Image (cartoon, rainbow, N blue to C red):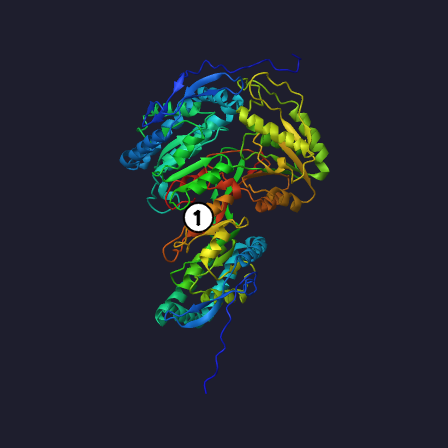
Amino acid sequence: MSFMDYAPAPESTGILNLNEHYGLFINGEFVAGRGENFTSISPATEAPIATFSTANVADVDVAVSAARAAYDSVWSKMSGADRGKYLFRIARLIQERSRELAVAETLDNGKPIKETRDVDIPLVAAWFFYYAGWADKLDFAGLGANPKSLGVAAQVIPWNFPLLMLAWKIAPALAAGNTVVLKPAETTPLTAMLFAEICQQADLPAGVVNIITGAGETGKSLVNHNDINKIAFTGSTAVGREIARAVAGSNTKLTLELGGKGANIVFDDAALDQAVEGIVSGIFFNQGHVCCAGSRLLVQENIHDEVMDRLKTRLSTLRLGDPLDKNTDIGAINSREQLDRITALSAQGEAEGGERWSPACEIPSKGFWFAPTVFTGVSPSNTIAREEIFGPVLSVMTFRTPAEAITKANNTPYGLSAGIWSEKGSRVLAVADKLRAGVIWANTFNKFDPASPFGGYKESGYGREGGLSGLTAYLEGGAA
Amino acid sequence: MSRLAVPKTYKLFIGGKFPRSESGRVYEVNSVAGEFVANAAQGSRKDMRDAVVAARAAQPGWSSATAYNRGQVLYRIAEVLEGRKAQFVEEIMLVEGASAKEAETQVDTAIDTWIWYAGWADKYTQVAGQANPVSGPYFNLSVPEPTGVVGAIAPQTSGSLLGLVATIAPILVSGNTVVVVPREDAPLTAISFAEVMATSDVPGGVVNVISGSPAELAPWMASHADINALDLAGAGSLDWASLQIAAAETLMRTLAPVEGIPASSLNRITAFTEVKTVWHTKSLI
């Protein structure tokens, strides 16, 4: 250990009190699933954490029935004020158990503890707190007096922000008066099950929240069930397309948060140190497992070399390793499957002529890891400039004029996010107007807030989550 | 001796021009009694694709016009329409078999509907947008903006002019451009309406009218990768589930069929918009 290194500072897992096995959470109780059990492992060590049940078609049916019964007999009849109180309770319980949830999330997902502790879990609590307050104010949602809830919502979420995605889905659905059946990703079911315990602690009426685990088949059974009124899905564009086809011709409302290939545009009048921090958080936050990641860096040609120098210097200071270590910046890739995909796409980036660079960093012997990677000399037609990699891989391109930057930024079937770095306000606003993306960060990146709508244009999906739009997505007459 | 009448040739409306269908096809438009009234152009896939090209080309200009200006241009259409009322009343009576009173009511309602929507141009963002109180030193606004090029099937069994107006007005207000298939058996008012467009201040390509068979044209629309949203208002008798399935390939936004005339609503405007959220840092002072 050199004098520049940090001593290990691991967060203790002693705070956890996990079960060896978690069943399905249906009608307020944990029950066995009829499918085969599966094991969730820690991607940093490959050590098993717990086993989980797989919900088959029959289990899905039971869960949807429980949600329907709870909707008809309890939740749709309860006053908004009381629904809000339950959500406030949940928000408080999340705050009280936040350290435990952060450790569990890091263990199961592989992301650094400083992210789960400072970003994921505080946002989860904030999400419930924000929507709790909406529950008795639906008359002010812009849809007239007494807007109606939809009924039962089927919700399928990804593995990149497991508990946060759960909060994005469940908080607005419940505030608006719906009941839910939610399926977490098969590689990250742990915190959803801890959330089920929180629902029990909050005395949430049975059946209002049902959480079923399993792989893609379980999700398919859920979204294809004929007694659901709303589907909210976050995940790949390919699966989003399948769901859009499945609901064709029906009245089922649909919110889709899909892939992205966000452009992060750096103008030559940007504050460069801040811009470099923004580039880093844009693509290396959460190992790049972020649908709105700034995976395409568009840097003005005259500052390309300087930005690259500063970026490489900065990346050389990032610490990759044990996600539970409080000093860790880059954690583990969530699964072997995802690691293989990142590896293959990066190899293709090299094969197509991109110049590949990574800082010198030691890769742990066990687990799934990928060093932060920067490709320069990328052409807009290259695979790594077009396909979502969903990993810590940045593709760098250049531009000369704002018009060229806008054209290149919009040259993608996706339209989720974009970043603009410039100290000139008039330029920022003009460029923001022309970018075809649902979330635009100017002189910042990857910021999320329950009050702020999030969602994509074009093939990044439709509907918004967060803010007022996120609420009306669960009300009749509302968007999407 | 009575004067020999000069019948009108009804053509398509693409990019501000009135071409015949490239396919060379026409179909007969008849009165309710079955008498020949006129030939209408039978639009083809190629016509539809040409119209999408025109609509795409016109979209940046139309959406970047100021909201005030867009409102005025749309209002101007209502003015021109009012002046040509008699022509529309006649076409509606002739083809739809409406009484003079019914036809007049339809035209009046169409004009009033158009004006109602025109007035939204510089207001809908205020009603549908939000300032978001995020936890941090950030300026944060969410504002709806046009989704792009919209394909639309106008109502096929209700008043032909009112159905067309109630379908395309909310699409245009926010700055979208449109390719619309009017009522198949009563397309005359749509083409005459295109003449209203051509003589008001709407830029060419903002509205494109392809008369013909919705059953033939809609699938090409739904699978067109450069159409951002699809209004199936008048597609109730088509296999619209299949259209939505085709539209899913590009995650095209779709609005399901309605019975009769689409009711005037803010929702029909926002259905063809995308919410854009912009964050900007505030400095610490």
Vertical placement of residue A130 versus B276, above or below? above
* Residue A117 position within the rendered picture, expressed as x and y whole percent measured from the top left: 50, 23
Q: Which residue is mark 1?
A: B242
Vertical placement of residue B165 versus A6, above or below? below
Could you tell me which quadrant the C terminus of chain A lies in?
top left
Residue farthest to the left? A73
**Residue under the image location 41 percent in, 56 percent down:** B234
* Residue A287 position within the rendered picture, expressed as x and y whole percent measured from the top left: 57, 27
Of B96 and A472, which appears nearest the observer?
B96
* Residue B259 position within the rendered picture, expressed as x and y whole percent measured from the top left: 36, 55
Q: Residues within 10 Å of mark 1 (few under 14, many from 20)?
A: some
Of A153 and A283, which appears nearest the observer?
A153
Q: Would residue B140 be found to the left or right of residue A90 on screen?
A: right
At label 1, which amino acid type do we have? Ser
Of B139 and B160, which appears nearest the observer?
B160
Q: Would residue A5 be found to the left or right of residue A140 on screen?
A: right
Vertical placement of residue A464 versus A62, above or below? below
Chain of the residue displaying label 1: B
Residue farthest to the top? A1
* Residue A464 position within the rendered picture, expressed as x and y whole percent measured from the top left: 46, 40
Residue B72 visible to the viewer: no
Could you tell me which quadrant the N terminus of chain A lies in?
top right
Where on the picture, by quarter, is residue A20?
A: top left
Vertical placement of residue A353 versus B230, above or below? above
Of A15 and A369, which appears nearest the observer?
A369
Under circle 1, the secondary element is: helix
Q: Would residue A431 be found to the left or right of residue B277 on screen?
A: right
Q: Would residue B20 be found to the left or right of residue B33 on screen?
A: right
Residue B42 visible to the viewer: yes
Where on the picture, by quarter, is residue A365?
A: top right
